[in-house]
Amino acid sequence: MENEDSLNEYATKAVILNAQFSSELLESIFATTTPLHDGAVIMRGKFIVAAAVILPLSEDSSQLGRAIGTRHRAALGLSQLTDALIIVVSEESGKISIAREGVITRGVKIDRFKAILRSLFTPPPEKIRNPFNFREWIRQ
């Protein structure tokens, strides 16, 4: 999930979609029988920008055990180079990991994962402006 740093460098080398996000579309992309299955998806806001994206692999294996595969290495690698939030779903176990700012957290519980997504997709509440401005009133 793109943040301030642009991920265009990776998107332009992949399959460009620029499609409104839907769970059905994401499921279709990652179905093992589809050509877009391999690689990552880049999201910008509520849009899937590209699929079949190849991400840079992390050179740092201190956070990753031998059993951790390329998907997790790529998530960590991108998080070391950008401010993106990278979500990894293990193909074998279905467990969720999150990589951000060069740190990968494995086995994120579903409630925490949902809270992270809500915080990203829910705009901050607008500040309620007090119609009575005391300082302005004093100046008059």
Image (spheres, rainbow, N blue to C red):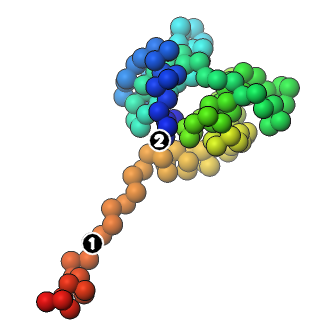
Q: Which of the pair 78/116 is nearer the observer?
A: 78
Residue 60 percent across, percent down from the top left: 78, 32
Residue type highlighted by circle 2? Glu
Q: Residue placed at 40% from the left, 35% from the top?
A: 46
| Disc 2: which residue | 4
Depicted 119 relative to depicted 92: above or below: below
Visible residue check, residue 98: no
Q: Residue placed at 72% from the left, 21% from the top?
A: 70
Q: Which of the pair 10/65 is nearer the observer?
A: 10
In the rendered structure, find residue 30 and report the number of the disc placed on it.
none
Looking at the image, residue 126 sits to the left or right of residue 104; the answer is left
Residue 62 percent across, percent down from the top left: 83, 36
Q: Reading the chain from its start, which is encountered first: label 1 or label 2?
A: 2
Residue type highlighted by circle 1? Arg
Q: Which of the pair 13/126 is nearer the observer?
A: 13
Looking at the image, residue 20 sits to the left or right of residue 59; the answer is left
Visible residue check, residue 85: yes
Image quadrant holding the C terminus, namely bottom left
Graded by Cα atoms within 10 Å as few (under 14), some (14 to 19) or many (20 or more), the crowding at tag 2 reads few
Residue 74 percent across, percent down from the top left: 67, 26
Q: Nearer the viewer, mark 1 or mark 2?
A: 2
| Disc 1: which residue | 129
- Corner quadrant of residue 126: bottom left
Q: Disc 1 to disc 2, how far (Cα)?
A: 28 Å
**Badge 2 element:** loop
Point out the residue furthest to the left here. 140
Q: Residue placed at 40% from the left, 57% from the top?
A: 124
**Badge 1 element:** loop
Looking at the image, residue 91 sits to the left or right of residue 6; the answer is right
Depicted 51 relative to depicted 75: above or below: above
